[in-house]
Amino acid sequence: MAVRPVLRMGNPQLFKKSDPVVKFNSHELDSLIIDLQDTMKAMHGAGIAAPQIGVLQRVVIFGFDSNTRYPNEDAVPFTVLVNPQIEFLTDMKIDGLEGCLSVPGMRGVVPRCQKIRYTGFDQYGNPIDRTVSDFHARVVQHECDHLDGILYPMKIEDFKSFGFVEELGLA
């Protein structure tokens, strides 16, 4: 359908809580998902959440076989996740470098739960229930945070690890 503009950090829309999807398998939801896919692909993202394109619905998509922004990470299966719920399966947190399409040109180290279970639905209302770890778990947590108005810099514990990609030596 269309590559949509991605809202950037500072836009008040990004700090709002999203509403649950109540109607599955609809033209509106299908169109939203196509726009999310087109936008994520054009921006080389690992994932994107509906609020990032100004839609306050609990919808995220993520996944890639390989990604130029995360060249050392394992593939994550492409997933459309609607009305997600996350259960933390361990107290262990792992520090990892994150970026965001809404915080362009910057990266920071964020502690995330190493192993999670996520549930929700695909766009047709079919249930999804997966237990994942490491980068896959990080991507899901990052994208689902957007649904609650949270951007990754809000979770950074040491701001010495947050900066522009070039300044951090990552370019």
Image (spheres, rainbow, N blue to C red):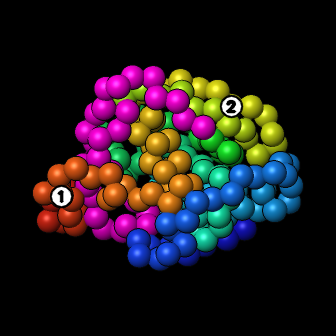
Label 2 or label 1, whichever lies nearer to me, is 1
Seen in the picture, residue 92 relative to 78 is either above or below; the reply is above
Seen in the picture, residue 60 relative to 27 is either above or below; the reply is above
Query: What span is colored magenta in the figure?
Result: 85-113
Residue type at mark 2 is Ile
Does residue 157 appear left or right of residue 38 in this picture? left
Position in image of residue 158 (x %, y %): 17, 52
Judge whether residue 91 can be spotted in this image.
yes
Name the disc covering residue 159, or none. Answer: 1
Q: Secondary structure at mark 1?
A: helix
Name the disc covering residue 128, or none. Answer: 2
Quadrant of image for the C terminus: bottom left
Q: Residues within 10 Å of mark 2 (few under 14, many from 20)?
A: some
Seen in the picture, residue 90 relative to 46 is either above or below; the reply is above
Which one is in front, 140 or 147? 147
Q: Residue at x 27, y 58 (%)?
A: 107
Magenta stretch holds residue 72: no
Residue type at mark 1 is Phe
Quadrant of image for the N terminus: bottom right
